Image (cartoon, helix red, strand yellow):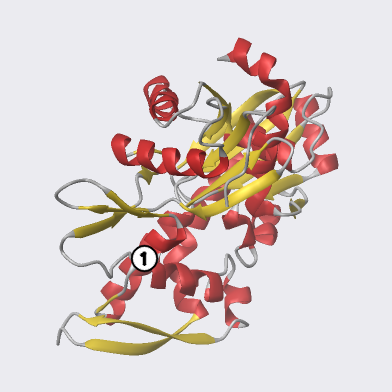
Amino acid sequence: MVFSLFGKKRIGIDLGTANTNVYVEGKGIVIGEPSVVAMEKDSGDVVAVGAEAKNMIGRTPGSIIATRPMKNGVIADFDTTAAMMEYFINKVSSRFGSKPSVVICVPGGGTEVEKRAVIDAAMLAGAREAFLIEEPFAAAIGADLPVNEPTGSMVVDIGGGTTDVATISLGGIVSGRMSRSAGDAMDEAIISHIRNKFNLLIGERSAELVKRELGSASLEGAKELGSADIRGRDLVTGLPQTISIDAVEIHEAIKEVVANIIAIVKETLEETPPEISADVIDRGIVLTGGGALLNGLTEAISDAVDVPVFVANDPLNCVALGTGIALSQMDVLRKRN
């Protein structure tokens, strides 16, 4: 479906490592698809983008490669990222309308070079102008936190490539941390654990599925989740094999990543001015992003820092919603960028 931007021509893009969400002013979130591109190996022509391309991962013939052009929250493959953004921008813009203004989310700890690459990719993809907003700030807006008021709020946005932690007050980030310990790191830890302990090689999609089904931040919670079958290739025989794995094994695999997330929450709180810390204790910490849905994570963080922790409404879409709301403040973004 093609959405016209006549009279609007402003879109927000949550350009995530795992998923990309697109918000059109006046319409809301109109696209939510995996950040995956399938391309012809020799010509570089795009074969598929989004959900269709993700289904090809690990299943492509030699002439086609399916890749995720974003890695750890930043652009790993510039040309492929630009092609992916062009696909999404074209999908929501009128072919004969003028080019849209675009607001794009970037991780809080990104370098100037990484931020410039995102703007350049957006311009190459067909944007008239492009502005950036930091992910934790967008997440806080999308979670309906009072970001412009003289009161402290704290958000932990756990995406695919990065975890962004920030305390926010009076329209800005007061203190923050960014870590590569996030959803992808959990998937990689699961793949590594199963390979080392069971001599079984599994793919990214299988690791993600088992994380969703059996992943738990706490050992006690894991004991209640049971087990599931997982399929892969036996590294000894080279043949396909199915094993049964329980949630305790998955907890063992991801516990270091969870510990790293808790550590940056602690570090951010330690850097936070006392008045804002008092506000955070009163209001609690809000979790957003796909990682917020991990079983037992709210309790694990709350126990570690002795502060209430909540999952935002619609955590998967908070960043995109916040980006969309920021479209109405384009003049402010122009000054910041």
Q: Residue 196: percent from the left, percent from the top? A: 27, 73
Q: Residue at x 59, y 31 (%)?
A: 176
Q: Is residue 122 left or right of residue 292?
A: left
Q: Residue 331: percent from the left, percent from the top? A: 68, 14
Q: Residue at x 72, y 21 (%)?
A: 329
Q: Is residue 80 left or right of residue 311?
A: left
- Kind of element beneath mark 1: helix
Q: Could you tell me if residue 268 is visible in this image?
A: no
Indicate whether 201 appears above or below 303: below
Q: Nearer the viewer, residue 237 or 67?
A: 67
Where the C terminus falls, by quadrant? top right
Q: Toward which corner of the image does residue 314 lie, by quadrant?
A: bottom right
Q: Residue at x 48, y 86 (%)?
A: 228
Q: Residue 71: percent from the left, percent from the top? A: 37, 44
Q: Residue 98: percent from the left, percent from the top? A: 55, 25
Residue type, label 1: Glu
| Residue under numbered circle 1 | 204
Q: Toward which corner of the image does residue 295 lie, by quadrant?
A: bottom right
Q: Nearer the viewer, residue 213 or 333?
A: 333
